[in-house]
Amino acid sequence: MVTRLNSKDLKFKQAFDAFITQDREGAADVAAVVRDIITAVRADGLAALKTYTQQFDGFELSDATIAVSADEIDRAEAACDADDLAALDFAAARIRSYHQRQMPRDERYIDDMGVTLGWRWTCVDAAGLYAPGGRAAYPSSVLMNAIPAKVAGVGRLAMATPSPKGEMNPLVLGAAKRAGVDEIYRIGGAQAIAALAFGAGAIAPVDVIVGPGNAYVAEAKRQVFGYVGIDSVAGPSEILVVADGKNDPAWIAADLLSQAEHAPSSQSVLITDDAGFADKVNVAVEEQLAASPRKQIAQATWNNNSAIIVVASLEDAPALVDRIAPEHLELAVDDPETLLAKVRHAGAIFLGRHTPEAVGDYVAGPDHVLPTAHAARYASGLSVMDFMKRTSIIGCDEAALAKIGPAAARLADAEGLASHAKSVRVRLKK
């Protein structure tokens, strides 16, 4: 049964704190297993990949089959439903357009002491993308991870995706082709992350690794961070809906279940100021669960990790939202802009009754790779910036150094770094 909380209850604060700090993923420690896999791939390269692919995906990998050929991609695309491909094209165009607006600009200027200052943005040389292929394959995630990299200007984009029993999802390959993926490898799990980070066989190492995955993939990304950049260590999916009683309960129930069906560790939360409406949503959720093809997964999420919270006024909602810092936040109210102005922490915010979170997952344009597990307090969703880095630019002529150099030398003296000070003063003697 879903957790029910009411802000008027005397112990609401304690109950709310307990709810938002619960462990949704369990305490399974995969770090040691992942460390062994990474060590093996670094030492044995392709041989280790062959062993793990046989063990985990159940097919024999070879030098000839590790990479997916252009012909294979074309055949997979031909096998896809034409309407599905059209939807991918539609989504890709909107995602690309949105991310093109994120491109940062270089800056150069001369300050009042004559010093040339600025910065320059450049993209990484190569990026790796992990595309899941286990419980569910997500072509939309391929678009969301690959397109920002290509918009940023990344010249080489390599994708790793598991192929259980040697089979691959045709629509995933179709999405990779549309997003501009340059290389596709049929490997998965922690071993794929290790291969992308350090290289293995024909797979050359990359600079940044992005993309979702299971606990082993997430831990592998954590362990290779520092050798390469990563987008984040993602946790289970989340949605929080702030809704008044004017909504259709069936709409809100469907929104809550849209994330509940991802995995048993997902979380769905409703905050409302209408107790009667909360009851109706709960009934609608149970009705929709009964007919859901992913009932077992969504039911576990709803019963174990989710909550309906009744507040005295929706003006109280932003403070609770910021404590949760959800991955997805829907503001299903008459005036979402008012609440939007008061919310600080959320991965993506969906405004109004006609903006379900699902449009953000597919076709709205912003990236659906978002911070989870309260990380929206300090992190942002995937963007072109994850594939770019900023380089500072500094330039002095003799006159400019004469103005700022003495202070630099004085600070170097104070820190006991004599050569730092000398490198400035030898230029000031003239």
Image: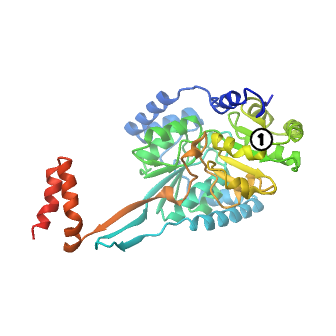
Q: Position of residue 213 (x, y in %)?
A: 59, 41
Residue tagged 1: 270
Q: Which residue lies furthest to the left in this view?
A: 429
Please give the name of the residue rendered at 21% of the width and 63% of the height, measured from the top-left corner.
405
Q: How many labels does the image show?
A: 1
Please give the name of the residue rendered at 28% of the width and 72% of the height, measured from the top-left corner.
113
Left or right, 416 with reference to 194: left
Please give the name of the residue rendered at 17% of the width and 61% of the height, measured from the top-left corner.
424
Q: Which amino acid does label 1 sit on?
A: Leu
Residue 373 falls in image quadrant? top right
Of the 4 image quadrants, the one containing the N terminus is top right
Q: Position of residue 416 (x, y in %)?
A: 17, 46
Q: Position of residue 72 (x, y in %)?
A: 61, 56
Task: Please say whether residue 363 is visible from this viewpoint.
Answer: yes
Of the 4 image quadrants, the one containing the C terminus is bottom left
Task: Please say whether residue 261 is visible from this viewpoint.
Answer: no
Judge by depth and name the residue closer to the eye, 9 or 230.
9
Left or right, 406 with reference to 22: left
Q: Where is residue 198 in the image (x, y as percent from the top left)?
A: 40, 45
Judge by depth and name the residue closer to the eye, 342 or 224.
342
Judge by depth and name the residue closer to the eye, 58 or 422.
422
The structure's colour scheme is: rainbow
Is 135 rendered above or below residue 71?
A: above
Please give the name of the residue rendered at 17% of the width and 51% of the height, measured from the top-left corner.
413
Judge by depth and name the residue closer to the eye, 125 or 111.
111
Mark 1 is surrounded, within 10 Å at the Cα level, by few (under 14), some (14 to 19) or many (20 or more) other residues, namely: many
Is 103 rendered above or below residue 200?
A: below
Left or right, 229 with reference to 395: right
Residue 225 falls in image quadrant? top left
Q: What element carries label 1?
A: strand
